[in-house]
Image: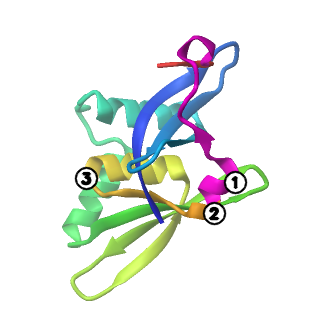
Amino acid sequence: MVRMELVSIGIVQGTDGTVMVLREVDNSRLLVIGIGPLEASAIAMELQGIVPPRPMTHDLLKNVLNTFRLSVERIVITDLRDNTFFAIIRLKSPTESVDVDSRPSDAIALALRTGAPIYCEESVLEAAGISDDLDDDNSTLVH
């Protein structure tokens, strides 16, 4: 597994597509994952420190986990099949750990709220990772 960090949320110029960009912590590969606008909004709100007056879905999940003394140990982007990324949320209780299937965007939105580390399987980075030496003038992302 490779430790990752969220670099940005953005739109692809000329489209309605929204993406999140992750970068390896100890290297220079990027992973760009298409996500829905609602998930992008949930991630962006957390990044900007916006606290809604009532809990949003990911805040609610965090509250439920806390109520039952569960913590998010880590999230892992585990696979890429048919152009679809897959992830798990590793939950830890006082007695065991369990993996829960998740979309990467939901897993990352929860990781940001709980401070959990983000990882990616090396095989996913080998298949979909791109070099971080992109020329900013040719970038298609708007941040």
Earlier in the chain: of badge 2 and badge 3, it is 3
Element under disc 2: helix
Q: What residue did someone put label 3 on?
A: 115
The label shown at residue 107 is none
Residue extending farthest to the right is 82
Q: Nearer the viewer, residue 136 or 16?
A: 136
| Mark 1 Cα-neighbour bin, 10 Å: few <14, some 14–19, many ≥20 | few
| Mark 3 Cα-neighbour bin, 10 Å: few <14, some 14–19, many ≥20 | few
Q: What residue did someone put label 2 on?
A: 123
Residue type pointed to by label 1: Ala
Gap in angstroms between the C-alphas marked 2 and 1? 6 Å
The residue shown at (36%, 64%) is 74
Q: Is residue 62 found left or right of 84 in the rendered image?
A: left
Q: Are marks 3 and 1 in contact (CB under 8 Å)?
A: no
The residue shown at (31%, 65%) is 72
Name the spot of residue 96 as percent of width and height, x first.
Answer: 31, 86
Name the spot of residue 108 as percent of width and height, x first.
Answer: 42, 49
Q: Are marks 2 and 1 in contact (CB under 8 Å)?
A: yes
Q: Is residue 11 found left or right of 22 in the rendered image?
A: right
Q: Is residue 25 visible?
A: yes
Q: What residue did someone put label 1 on?
A: 127
Report the mark closest to the observer, 3 or 1.
Answer: 1
Gap in angstroms between the C-alphas marked 2 and 3? 25 Å
Element under disc 1: helix
The residue shown at (47%, 62%) is 76
Q: Quadrant of residue 61?
A: bottom left
Residue type pointed to by label 2: Ser
Tell me where the magenta segment starts and ends, as one range. Answer: 124-139
Height in image: 103 above or below 95? above
